[in-house]
Image (cartoon, helix red, strand yellow):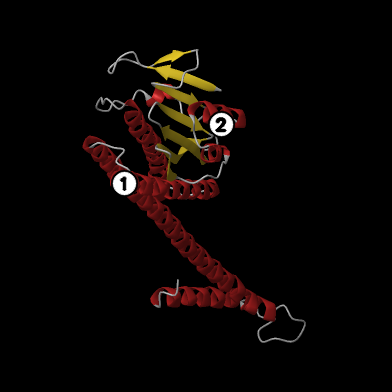
Amino acid sequence: MLHYFVKNSLLGEFQRITVPRYKDVWIHAGNATVNDVEEISKNAGLNANIVHDVTDANELPRVEYDNGDLYVFTRIPTKDKHGHVTASPLLSIVTKDAFITLSHDGSLNPSELVKIKLKAKQDQSINLLINSLAHVIQTYETLIQETGHVVNDIGKRLRTHEVTNSDFVRFVTIEDNLNIYRMNLNGLHVITQRLTENIHRSFHNSDTEALGDISLHVQQLVAAVEGYSQTVVSIRNAYSTIANNTLNQRMKILTLLTVLVALPNVFYGMYGMNVDLPFQHAPWAFGVISAIVVTVVILVITMVRKFKAF
């Protein structure tokens, strides 16, 4: 469903109107349908083929120019209750008469977008475009910080507790999320770089400066994502090393115990055979055999410690 917002003054607040208009207005549609695309394309004189791409959940970030109109595709992230992040297309359109935003799944909230305060400009549409880019990047930053807290928490627990299987399941989700951040932020960086070039002279100098700041912010977020990805890999490698070392120590202990248990059985087994044996009728035979067994066990333990075999 299409929603229409207008300003009565440059510094005023956006007000929603119920009567459709297509000049000096901001038009927004969350969960944009084919009917919304057809309606806005027809009434605003847009390229329907380009606008229709916002209904494709896999549409990648890009910039298009057509008949003086600027089309900017980005992907805005959302996180579900299980902590898995997905990104869906957001199309921002700048025309000479209006600013239009169409989102694939309703992830863009107009009330959140207008909260971002940038320097007031006469060109309201360009200002809103920069706001929309800043809002998308701010959303990524919030989710990246949340992911970073989770990674750091697991890393701290590794120092005092064993990492559980559920932590490794979370690692899979975290790495998927980081890959989504990286892919879409790189796309945003390309977009901001292209917009900063200002080939079509759509932006003023102050606008390109703002876009340059946004581009720098994107690069910083990409660096943060790379850092968290490396931290996850380091934690996994550290735990694998610790787990292997622990397993080796346990296997050594089990081997030593097996040897110590087997040695007495050698002597006891010999004197349990139904054949004539030396001293088998002597009353002190059991004590001597037991002493020999204890001596051999102590000798084995001493040799193991001396040669640090375990």
Q: Looking at the image, how many numbered discs can be counted on the residues?
A: 2
Disc 2 residue type (three-letter):
Val
Position above or below: 68 against 43: below
Out of 75 and 251, give the one closest to the viewer.
75
User: In screen coordinates, is 128 left or right of 243?
Assistant: left
> How far apart are the two marked residues, 2 and 1, measured between alpha carbons?
27 Å
Residue at 59% across, 76% down: 263
N-term-proximal mark, 2 vs 1: 2
Out of 22 and 172, give the one closest to the viewer.
22
- Residue 230 falls in which quadrant of the image? bottom left
Q: Position of residue 268 (x, y in %)?
A: 66, 76
Q: Position of residue 118 (x, y in %)?
A: 27, 28
The answer to whether residue 283 is seen in the rendering is no
Q: Position of residue 222 (x, y in %)?
A: 35, 49
Residue at 29% across, 47% down: 197
Disc 1 residue type (three-letter):
Ile
Q: Identify the residue position indicated by label 2 in the image.
A: 37
Out of 206 and 84, give the one closest to the viewer.
206
Q: Identify the residue position indicated by label 1 in the image.
A: 199
